[in-house]
Amino acid sequence: MSKKIYVTTPIYYVNDKPHIGHAYTSVATDFLARYHRIIGNDVRFQTGTDEHGLKIQKAAEKEDIKPIDLCDKNSTKFRELSKILNISNNDFIRTTEDRHIKGAQFLWNKLYENDQIYLDEYTGWYSVSDETFYNEKDLIKDEKGNFKTITGGNVEWISEKSYFFRLSNWSDKLLEYYKNNPDFIMPASKRKEVVSFVSSGLRDLSVSRTSFNWGIKTPNDNAHIMYVWLDALTCYPNGVNYLSDEKEDVSDYWENTTHIVGKDILRHHAVYWPAFLMAANLTLPKRIFAHGWWTNEGNKISKSLGNVIDPIEIIDKYGLDQFRYFMLREVPFGNDGDFSIKALEGRINSDLANDLGNLCQRSLSMVNKHLGNKIKCVSLDKEELEILNSAIELNKNLSDMVMNQNITDYIKSVWDLINNSNKYFNANEPWKKVKVDLDEFNKILFTTAELIKIIAIYIFPIMPSTSKKIFNFLNLEDSNINSEYLKIEEFNDYKINSIEALFPRIT
Ligand code: MSP
């Protein structure tokens, strides 16, 4: 039965152009959206840009342009990156859009009406780079004696009038919620961190600023703008029109929401966000999954080290599907990982060119050479039926893995299938059979073509263009690759189109 599903990436800060971390979150979320569509779910997938706050205002001042002009310029770059990465989002939200501003103010009003917000003064540390308030105990001192965030970001001491959200009242409710919904935060190691953070006690959270003006006005008081995280988080329900009194059908998606975020922003998503929603009597998302961080050849990625990786350069050189595959396969989803050119080239040559590329090319070009582009549909023996049925059955496991965002095991299982298919092909030695038994040869190639079709469906979430290319080799309609194709074609002959190398080897 088709389910309504909503998946989201974080919205990206527009102070600078996109880098590999943004590309990673988007590709991983795209994987999930595409798989859900394959199995017939009705998916909404939102990405977008986070455009308010001091970080953006300062970046605009530095370039001597208006904040909105900086936002327009850089938001376009993120939109373009989504296209380059072949991301299948249905929506791209900007926090400077009216629909977003209305939704953010709607949530504020609910919190205000429910007496969850009060006026006071914030005096303490603030990091502009991650737009976060810090307790001194959570900071570290550098060699010069200056306080820094654990990721090395600067903090400044601020003191200004501010509205506060009664976060401290929600500690117990949050802990109870985590306990009753053990899958709310994943992976489990990250849930533990959040539970221990909340257990140590929460302080009320400053949710408005008065010392600058690039933000959404708080509806009850013109002198304040909303804290940028309160503003930004509402982008998610705003994309499905949930923060409004006139909810449309689209808000049904909200009931089944998965947020994919990096580990650096887990606290905002797994503590502040559910507390805001509970305090406003609104529905919480189903799942928050935090992925790890990439380093570059073993080093932390940072502008000051000058080692920021531009995803577009890598894609230009190695190809998009190669890049997507590497990002998703190299690092267990949820862990930190390292980006290295050697590892990327290794994966392209072994997993892509040798395993997948060879399977398709060797077998299908034999059809074109010896069977005049046609494979006849034949009745299959036990061995063939078994291998094909288990390839089809695999989809049940894959589906369970996707429900748990287990992208890593998904890819490993698909590669086991590719390797088993190669084994079947080799063990049956079609290059010998072609000389002595053309029917037997045809049967081996038919089975292999069926396996290749099933594999093409499973790799669609990872490498959509390659998947389509394989469908084209098999002369199958590629506009809607889905699990309807997961059956043995008992009546259809195959016509094989001309074959090209899928993944050029890197030498
Ligand atoms: N604007 C906030 C999110 C608001 S969501 C309501 C934000 N933006 S961001 O542009 O700084 O980061 C967006 C995503 O990129 C985060 O999920 C972050 O973890 C990810 N990455 C940034 N650098 C990264 C790496 N080096 N490695 C992996 N992902 C990282 O935070």
Image: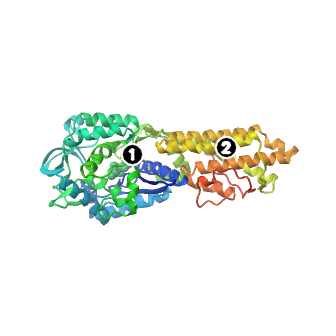
Looking at this view, is 354 or 34 the one in front?
34
Q: Which mark identifies residue 266?
A: none
Q: Image quadrant for the C terminus? A: top right
Give how far across and how far down residue 92 sits, in percent.
Answer: 40, 60
Q: Amino acid at mark 2?
A: Asn
Q: Is mark 2 within 8 Å of ligand 1?
A: no
Q: Is residue 507 left or right of residue 3?
A: right
Q: Which residue carries the number 1 mark?
A: 287
- Name the residue that disc number 2 marks: 389
Mark closest to the chain's N terminus, 2 or 1: 1
Dot 1 falls on a residue whose secondary structure is strand
* Labels 2 & 1 near each other (Cβ < 8 A): no
Q: How far across and down, in percent of the image, does residue 443 sit?
A: 78, 47
Q: Residues within 10 Å of mark 1 (few under 14, many from 20)?
A: many
- Between 481 and 245, the one nearer to me in the picture: 245
Q: Position of residue 296 (x, y in %)?
A: 44, 41
- Above or below: residue 110 compared with residue 424: below
Instruction: Give, as a three-letter code, the residue at label 1.
Output: Arg
